[in-house]
Image: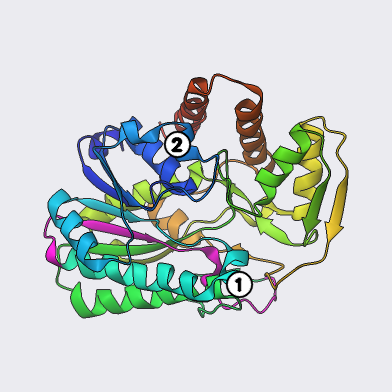
Amino acid sequence: MKNFWKNKKVLITGHTGFKGSWMTLILSKFGARIYGYALNPISKPNFFDGLKLSSFLKKDIRNDILNLNKLTKSINKIKPEVIFHMAAQSSVLESYKDPLGTTKANIIGTANILEAIRSCKSVKAVLIVTTDKVYLNLEKRKKFKEGDHLGGYDIYSGSKASCEVITHSFIKSFYRNSNCKIATVRSGNCIGGGDWTKDRIVKDCAESFIFNKKIFIRSPEASRPWQHVIEPIFGYLKLAQKLYKNKSFVGAWNFGPNIKNNMRVIDVARFGKKYLNSKSKIEFISKRQYESEHLSLDSSKVTKLLKWKTHLKSKEALALSFDWYKFFYKNKNKKKLIELSFKQINNYQKKYFI
């Protein structure tokens, strides 16, 4: 894997976000020439600024993907070989507050990426990052396969399902005979240090338990397939490497953990309280808006064809996340935070991706 990425020109949209920041770190480790295209981070603190990740980039471009003209000019100037499209409005609850903004960012933003790269002959592989929430979930506790019906009860889910549809349409309309190969990747409930998006359960637990503050939990019985962000990112890199040379990898891919990794929200909170040795009280609040209670992916396709699977159990992923937040809040020397982040990446790679 390392040899493939060395000196590859890679563009990450949404590089200032949670997943984009971890992707930047991992690609820098492999020697890629990384370019970023995104808005400023939406939260303070944030992973990108906290670790000064701009120093890992060849160019840090701050623009809106909704501006097609600027996006196209930047892509043609950079001439990337691989693109990871991660720029998005990624919060279910935020999508209720700003449905049009979410729709524009996720649907039009994706369409703009697909349109912009049509004129750039250097691009060989594109991964459009969506979510496990693209499926029509009738709460039957089924594991969703790539060919299952798409849908979306909430605006966020619907916008991401639409990303899948518009990507499929672009592939069929413009990329069937192109050297540029495109895939969509679906994963969800990625946890890890540095995610300060509002209403993230792991971040909220970490902050409350580290400072012994009361925490309010919504949807305590909701079951989720928790996975550390490092795991799907290694999967994305593996897929992009295959996609770069082989059209048979075009299409949709699930990157989800084994169903045994599912944990209820309340169990996540209880584990965090015990792990961080906290005396905080856990209280429940009613849901403000609809969210799926049960959600699991069938990742047999990626396991069979890419030999990828998750290795970390939910509690291991949670422990890595809580360790990161505890280090962040308890240590004044933030420079060592990047050492911890690389240590987590290196330990994972040595154990599972030698």
Q: Residues within 10 Å of mark 2 (few under 14, many from 20)?
A: some
**Secondary structure of the residue carrying numbered label 2:** helix
Q: Is residue 129 magenta?
A: yes
- Please report the residue visible at 16 percent of the width from the left and 59 percent of the height from the top: 73
Q: Is 204 displayed left or right of 196 in the figure?
A: right
Q: At label 1, which amino acid type do we have? A: Tyr
The N terminus sits in image quarter: top left
In this view, the residue in front, 328 or 45, is: 45
- Please report the residue visible at 32 percent of the width from the left and 33 percent of the height from the top: 56
- Please report the residue visible at 35 percent of the width from the left and 67 percent of the height from the top: 109
Q: Which disc number belongs to residue 277?
A: none
Q: Is residue 146 visible?
A: no
| 83 is higher (above) or lower (below) than 338 | below
The alpha-carbon separation of the residues under discs 1 and 2 comes to 28 Å
The C terminus sits in image quarter: top left
**Secondary structure of the residue carrying numbered label 1:** helix
| Residue 96 coordinates in the image, percent (x, y) | 61, 72
| Residue 343 coordinates in the image, percent (x, y) | 49, 25
Instruction: Quickly name the residue at label 2.
Output: 49
Q: Residues within 10 Å of mark 1 (few under 14, many from 20)?
A: some
Q: Which disc number belongs to residue 96?
A: 1
Name the main secondary structure of what is drawn in magenta.
loop
Q: Which residues are magenta?
A: 119-141
Mark toward the start of the polypeptide (1 vs 2) = 2
Q: At label 2, which amino acid type do we have? A: Asp
Tell me whether circle 1 and circle 2 mark residues in contact (CB < 8 Å).
Answer: no
